[in-house]
């Protein structure tokens, strides 16, 4: 059964790799897109905004469909939607056609990741699910690597239309592979499908305290990494901190190293200590706050080691945010898992996007108040305002954790205080050694 589970997961995660490839493909073709569609930077950015907006808006609808029809159907349909979008983009010559293509890519992408997480939850033992979930995220980033190197080479060799037609063909191949290799559940498992329309399952998911613990855990750890990696890290390092572009790019790669190292560790700890998952979330959030504070309170540019530390600490937030999905998994029954996972994903994503925009708004305000654009003075205000989402999300973690533990106590599960739990662990080796020696316990 373990070999079969690995094969099913392998096919599903391959579909996720290709989904990430589709998602990031347009980002490396900005110059060619400007020439092909005769547009400026604002319209070019709108292509990505539309795609991301569709992805976020369809999270909960796709989660409801996932609970109703299962991951095999959703991953297949998602792959075909993205393939259709890439084919349309390959032949489009005007802006409306290109926008429609990105809508299709965003819709297909919205169905993929949450469906792969459903495969992991159903096919693997509960204790292994957190680790395999972390590995899913790590392997999926190969799609971004593929878009940054091989895809650009193909574009320069073959041109726009053949490149996107080729991406569409890859999507069709993946859809066929999913139909052949992915099953919704192991043989002999009774699959319970979601029912009750839209409002009933959504109300049940939102009424579960563990869902909200997942939302706030996902958001609290994800938004610092998103702010640094997705948009504001490079201008902060180059303009505000004065690093050369090559050195700044090298510093940002530390984020990748942090994700690779921290992901499996957090996955193993989550599986072994499910009652202490919130401590990993809070520790990551507090470390991010400390790193930001250390950088922003300095009167001038920070030393290189401190900037590397900031990028590394925020990078750990990526794997830590996956703990939010584990809360959704353990707090909701299987027939609502898709909806719960999608809600956690979409809500956490919304906080990250709002944080990105908030930094931009405050940077502009600081510039209008007399600060140099993207200067260290401006970024002190721009990054300083991130204390608002930090307080919001960390408070959300603490409040929802209390509500979740109250629900657990009602079900007869008591989470002991950390000091008491550590005391028990310290006493176990002594008890085992006494039992092995045959001596009576003292006291």
Image (cartoon, rainbow, N blue to C red):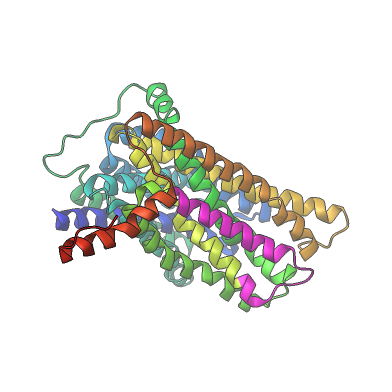
Q: Which quadrant would the C terminus be assigned to in this image?
A: bottom left
Most foreground residue, 391 or 166:
391
Instruction: Report the residue at 34% width, 53% height from top.
Output: 424
Most foreground residue, 248 or 275:
275
Most foreground residue, 75 or 252:
252
Most foreground residue, 31 or 228:
228
Residue 70, percent across and down? Answer: 27, 38
In this picture, which residue range is highlighted in magenta? 278-307
Q: Is residue 52 left or right of residue 431?
A: right
Considering only vertical position in the picture, is 148 above or below 378? below
Q: Is residue 42 left or right of residue 48?
A: right
| Residue 353 in view (yes/no) | yes
Instruction: Report the residue at 33% width, 21% height from top.
Output: 196
Residue 294, percent across and down? Answer: 68, 65
Residue 395, percent across and down? Answer: 58, 41
Q: Which SS type dominates the magenta stretch?
A: helix
């Amino acid at each position: 059964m373990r070999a079969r589970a690995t094969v099913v997961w392998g096919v599903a995660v391959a579909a996720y790799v290709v989904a990430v490839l589709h998602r990031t493909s347009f980002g490396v073709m900005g110059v060619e897109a400007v020439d092909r569609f005769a547009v400026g930077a604002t319209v070019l950015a709108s292509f990505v905004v539309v795609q991301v907006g569709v992805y976020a808006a369809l999270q909960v609808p796709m989660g409801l469909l996932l609970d109703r029809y299962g991951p095999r159907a959703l991953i297949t349909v998602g792959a075909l939607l993205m393939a259709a979008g890439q084919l349309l983009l390959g032949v489009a010559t005007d802006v409306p056609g290109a926008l429609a293509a990105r809508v299709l890519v965003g819709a297909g992408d919205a169905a993929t990741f949450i469906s792969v997480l459903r495969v992991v939850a159903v096919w693997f033992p509960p204790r292994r699910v957190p680790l395999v979930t972390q590995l899913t995220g790590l392997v999926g980033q190969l799609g971004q690597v593929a878009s940054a190197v091989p895809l650009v080479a193909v574009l320069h060799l073959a041109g726009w239309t053949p490149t996107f037609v080729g991406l569409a063909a890859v999507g069709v191949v993946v859809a066929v592979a999913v139909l052949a290799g992915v099953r919704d559940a192991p043989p002999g498992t009774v699959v319970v499908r979601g029912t009750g329309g839209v409002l009933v399952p959504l109300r049940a998911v939102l009424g579960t305290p563990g869902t909200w613990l997942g939302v706030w855990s996902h958001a609290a750890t994800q938004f610092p990494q998103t702010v640094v990696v997705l948009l504001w890290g490079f201008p902060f390092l180059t303009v505000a901190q004065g690093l050369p572009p090559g050195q700044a790019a090298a510093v940002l790669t530390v984020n990748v190293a942090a994700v690779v190292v921290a992901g499996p560790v957090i996955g193993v700890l989550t599986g072994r200590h499910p009652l202490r998952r919130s401590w990993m979330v809070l520790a990551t959030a507090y470390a991010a706050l400390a790193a930001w504070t250390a950088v922003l309170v300095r009167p001038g540019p920070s030393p290189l080691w401190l900037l590397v530390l900031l990028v590394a600490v925020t990078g750990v937030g990526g794997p830590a945010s996956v703990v939010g999905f584990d809360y959704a998994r353990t707090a909701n029954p299987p027939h609502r898992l898709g909806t719960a996972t999608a809600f956690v994903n979409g809500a956490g994503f919304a906080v990250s996007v709002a944080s990105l925009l908030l930094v931009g708004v405050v940077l502009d305000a600081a510039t209008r108040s007399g600060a140099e654009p993207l200067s260290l003075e401006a970024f002190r205000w721009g990054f300083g305002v991130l204390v608002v989402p930090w307080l919001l999300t960390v408070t959300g973690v603490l409040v929802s954790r209390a509500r979740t533990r109250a629900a657990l106590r009602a079900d007869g599960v008591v989470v002991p205080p950390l000091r008491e739990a550590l005391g028990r662990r310290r006493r176990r080796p002594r008890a085992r050694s006494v039992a092995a020696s045959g001596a009576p316990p003292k006291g």
